[in-house]
Every structure is written in C-alpha cells, then in structure tokens.
Image (cartoon, rainbow, N blue to C red):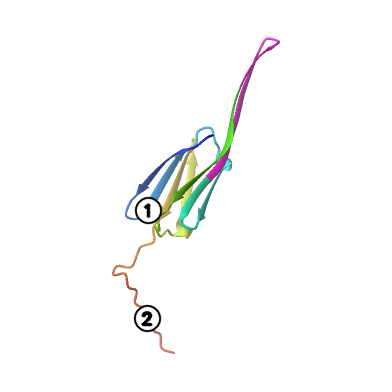
Amino acid sequence: AFIPRIDVEETETELEITAELPGMEQKDVSISLVEDSLVLSGEKSSAVEKKDGKNVYYRESSYGSFERVIPLYGLKVDHDRISATFKNGRLKIILPKIEPTKSGVKKVPIREE
C-alpha cells in the first residue's frame, strides 16, 4: 500500500502540511476537512512495460489508493482561507489559524434602535 510521507509544522498564525506524492498528479488527490481532522486521499497508478524480442516482457506496476487523516486537536482554522498548491509531486496545504480573542472574552456591542 502507498502511504505518502507528511510533515506538519505549526507557527503562531498557521499550520503547514506538506505531503510527498511522487508520480502523482493534482487530479489524483483530494483534500477535505472533516470535523477536527484534515483528510488527504487519492489514488496512485502507474505502469512501465518493456518488450524485448518476441517472448520477453518486463512489466512493473504501482497502484493503489490511500487516505491520511491528520487530527487538528481542536485547532481553530479559518475555513475560507485554506489554500493548497501542488508542484512536482509535492502538495503543500496552508491552514490559517483563527486568532483567538486576547482576553478570552468578547464584548458584544448593543445598538440603539
């Protein structure tokens, strides 16, 4: 089974996830947020075939689907600003954090009608 390697880095403002997906294309990968987890899934398929002479064949195939679930452990993420880029088999996902209120208390203004 193919299991992509991932790196997860957290800064004060965001969570950055990088996945190594060699031999894959952007169209083969899916990213979704499910409750408190990021789900990375996809399907890998590739085949190499060589034919030498009349009856000698060489075939090497690699295929399969994968799913990686990355728990966010209650991290508050701005769903509208999540971004992902894919280049040369490397997927980079940026999850911006929602800035908590400074005191933990948010004052609600009351408007006069």
Residue 48 is covered by the magenta coloring: yes
* Mark 2 or mark 1, earlier in chain: 1
Where is residue 51 shown, x and y percent of the image?
A: 66, 15
Measured in 3D between alpha carbons, the distance from the residue under mark 2 to the one under mark 1, in whole angstroms, is 29 Å
Three-letter amino acid code at the position of disc 1: Glu
Where is residue 82 shown, x and y percent of the image?
A: 46, 54
Residue visible at 56% across and 42% down in the picture:
42
- Label 1: how many Cα within 10 Å (few below 14, some 14–19, many 20+): some
Numbered mark located on residue 85 in the image = none
Q: Which image quarter: residue 56?
A: top right
Using the image, determine if residue 99 lies above or below residue 105.
Answer: above
State the SS at label 1.
strand
Residue 19 is covered by the magenta coloring: no
Quarter of the picture containing the C terminus is: bottom left
Magenta region, main secondary structure: strand
Query: Residue reaching furthest top?
Result: 53
Q: Which image quarter: residue 73?
A: bottom left
Using the image, determine if residue 111 lies above or below residue 12.
Answer: below
Query: Residue reaching furthest right?
Result: 54
Q: Give the magenta part as a residue range.
A: 41-59
State the SS at label 2.
loop
Where is residue 19 shown, x and y percent of the image?
A: 45, 40
Find disc 2 in the rendering and name its residue.
109
Quarter of the picture containing the N terminus is: top right
Question: Which residue is nearer to you in this view: 61 or 13?
Answer: 61
Residue visible at 39% across and 45% down in the picture:
8
Question: Which residue is nearer to you in this view: 13 or 62?
Answer: 62
Where is residue 9 shown, x and y percent of the image?
A: 36, 46
Residue 84 left/right relative to 12? right
Find disc 1 in the rendering and name its residue.
14
Three-letter amino acid code at the position of disc 2: Pro
- Label 2: how many Cα within 10 Å (few below 14, some 14–19, many 20+): few
